[in-house]
Image (cartoon, coloured by chain):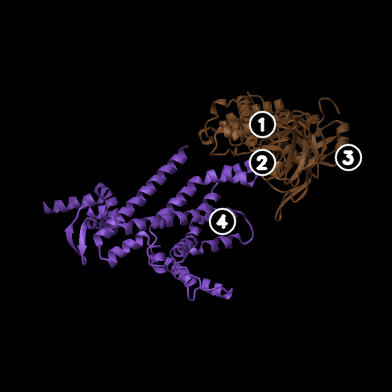
Amino acid sequence: MSSVLYQGVVKNYGALNVLRSLDLAVPDHMFLALLGPSGCGKTTALRILAGLDMPSAGKLFIGEREVTRLQPRDRDIAMVFQSYALYPQMTVGENIGYPLWIRSMPDGERRTKIAEVAAVLEISHLLDRRPRQLSGGQRQRVALARAIVRDPAAFLMDEPLSNLDARLRLTMRGEIKRLCQRLGATTLYVTHDQVEALTMADFVAVMHAGELQQMAPPGDIYDRPANRFVATFVGNPPMNILPVALAEQGIAIGGTLVSIPAARLAACRVAQVIEIGLRPEDMSVSAPGAPNALPGEIYVVEPMGNETLVNVRIGGGNVSVRAGRDFRGAVGANIAVTFDVSNACFFNSAGLTAVHRVNSDGE
Amino acid sequence: MANGGTQRRKYRLQGAGLDLALPYLMLAPGLLIVLGVLVYPLWDGLRASTKAYRYGSVVADVGMQNYIQLWSDPQFLNALWVTVKFVALSVTFEAILGFALALFCLREFRGIRLLRTILIIPMVITPVVVAIVFRLIYASDAGMLTAISEWMGAGQVQILGSPVKAFIGLVVLDVWEWTPLMFLILLAGLQSLPHEPFEAARVDGAGNWRVFADLTFPMMRPVLAIAIVLRTIDAFGTFDQVFVLTRGGPGEATRLVSIYGYDTAFKFQQTGYAAALFVTIGLVVLALAFSAVRLLRRVDAS
C-alpha cells in the first residue's frame, strides 16, 4: 500500500477544461471518496491516476514513484469499474486470477490465491460460471475479488455500486467498507452519492466543475462545509440558504429581525456575510408569533415515516424543516420556524463559508 | 334472394372476413414473385439434373446417373480440388488481412475516416471490371508487371500462362477484392465490443499482445466465424473474375467448379449433367454453412 499524490493535474479535452489544477494528497491506508455531481471531473481524476487517460499537465505520484507517464500496467494499481468490466469469455475463476496469470504466478499458488479471495467475497461456488450467468451483485463481487487478489499500491473504484439496485447497494456498501478496512488499503472511491461518501470514507473530497472544493472527514464536510456548494450538495434535503441583512442587534431574514449573540454578530459583520445556511434538522416548527421565529406558511408536507419534512415559505424563499413524525399541518396554514443561531453558518459574497457553526466541543 | 347474397358477400369483405383475408392478399404478390423466380427454377433445375439432354432437348430419363457419374469424372474432381484450394487460400488471407486492417483502423487519428472509405473501394467495383484491370496488370506483353520488370532491366513477366502463377494471380485478385468485406464486418465487430474489459485488462497488467490474445480474439470469434462462413459460401460461387481472367486455364489450373459447370452446360450442352453438378455444389455449400452455424452455436454456448 502507498500514498497517492496529485500535483497540479490538469485535463483538457480540446477547449473543454475538465480538471483545473487538481492538488490532492491521499495518505497511505486512507479511504478517500471523490464526491461530486456528474461532470465534475471525479471520474477523469481517477482514470488519470489509473493511466487510462493522460493528464494535460501536472504530476502523479504513487508512493515515492512518479507515475505520470507510465502505462497502466506499470502503476501497480487495481481498479473496479462501474460496469464491472469482467472478461466475458473467461470463467469467474479465470477472471479473478487474470492479474496473477499475467504476472506469471505459478498455477498452484494462483489457485490458492483465487480460492482465498473467493472465500472472502463468498463466491467460491461460482468459480466455474461465466460472467453473464451471474446477477449484478455477484458480478460486483467478482470485480472486487479481481481487484483484491493482488496486493496493489492502491485501489481505484469508479462508482462500483451505481449499477446495483437500492437494497443490494446498501449491503455492498457495508461490505466494501469492511473489506477496505480489513485490507488497510489506500482507496480512491468515486461516487456521486453523498450517502456512500459519508458512510464509507475516512476522508471526502468534494469536487465541482473540475475543482476540488473541500477535503475533510465526513463529519466536517457535513458540519463545516467550506463553501456554499459543499453546503448545498451534501445533505438530504440540502441545507437551507436564506439571504440575511445585518442589523444593530441581530440579523434580518426576509424582514424579520432575529437577535443573535453579540460575538457572533460581530464576526458576521467583519466577514460581511450575505447569506445564512441552516440544516433542516437544525430548524423546528412552532406556533406563529413565537419570539425570534420566522413567520411563514406551509408549502408542502412530506411524511417520511420516521419524520416529516415540512417545506415552509418564508418571505419569498422556501426552507425544509425536519419535524416529528406526528406533525400535522394544512397546506397554506400559518406557521413559524425557529432555530438556534449557533447551528447556522454564514456565507460571504464569494460563496465561501465566512462564519461556521459553533461546534459542540466549543469554538 | 340474389340481392341478399351480394349483401352478405359485401358484408364479409368488409368485416372480420376481410381482416382474415388481408394478410394473404398482401402477401400474394411477393409470394408469386418468389415462386416464379426462386422456387420454380430450383424445382426445374432439380428435375433437369435427372435427365439426359442432346442439343437442348431431353432425350432420356437417367435418374441419379448424372450424380453418380460426377464422382468418377476426373475433370469435376479436379475442379472441386482447385475450388477448395482457391477458397481456403483466399479466405484465409482475407481473414488475416481484414482482421489486421480492422485492428489498425480501430484507432482514431487524422484521416481515419477517409482511410476506412478508401479501404472498401475494391469491394464496390464491379467484379468483371476488377478482372479486366487485373488482366491488364498480368498481361505478359503489355501488362503493368511486365512494364515494371522491363524498366528494371528484366524480361517479360509470365503470369496467366503458367498454371501455378495463374492460380496465385487469381487468389491475389480475390484477396484484393474481398478483403474489404472482411475488414468491414470485423471493424463493425470490433467497434461493438465493450471497451471497459480492455481498460480493466490494461490496469490488470496486460500488454498489447496479451490484450489481443486474451480478450480481442476470443471476443471476436463469433464475428470472425460469421465473416469466414459468408466469404466461403461466396467464394465457392466465384465465376466472373475467372471467366474474364483465365477462362479456367491454362489447362485446368484455374478451372473452378463454376467454370466447369458453365462449360458443361453451355459449351458441351450437357444441361442435365451441369444441373446435377450445381445441385451437388449447392448441397456441399449448404452442408458447410450448416456445420459452421452449429460450430458457432457451440462456441457461443460454451
Label at residue B101: 4
Q: Circle 2 sits in a helix, a strand or a loop, which is it?
A: helix
Q: Are marks 4 and 3 in contact (CB under 8 Å)?
A: no
Q: Which kind of residue does numbered mark 1 sit on?
A: Ile
Label at residue B203: 2
Residue that carries the numbered disc 1 in the rendered image: A148
Residue at left 49%, top 49%? Answer: B224
Q: Which kind of residue does numbered mark 4 sit on?
A: Leu
* Dot 3 alpha-carbon crowd within 10 angstroms: few under 14, some 14 to 19, many 20 or more: few
Chain to which the residue tagged by mark 3 belongs? A
* Dot 4 alpha-carbon crowd within 10 angstroms: few under 14, some 14 to 19, many 20 or more: many
Residues indicated by labels 1 and 2 sit on the same polypeptide chain: no
Residue situated furthest top in the rendering: A326
Drawn side of residue B237 relative to residue A247, left or right: left
Residue A127: where, in percent of width, then height? 55, 29
Q: Are marks 1 and 3 in contact (CB under 8 Å)?
A: no
**Residue A328 seen anywhere in this rendered image of the structure:** no
Chain to which the residue tagged by mark 1 belongs? A
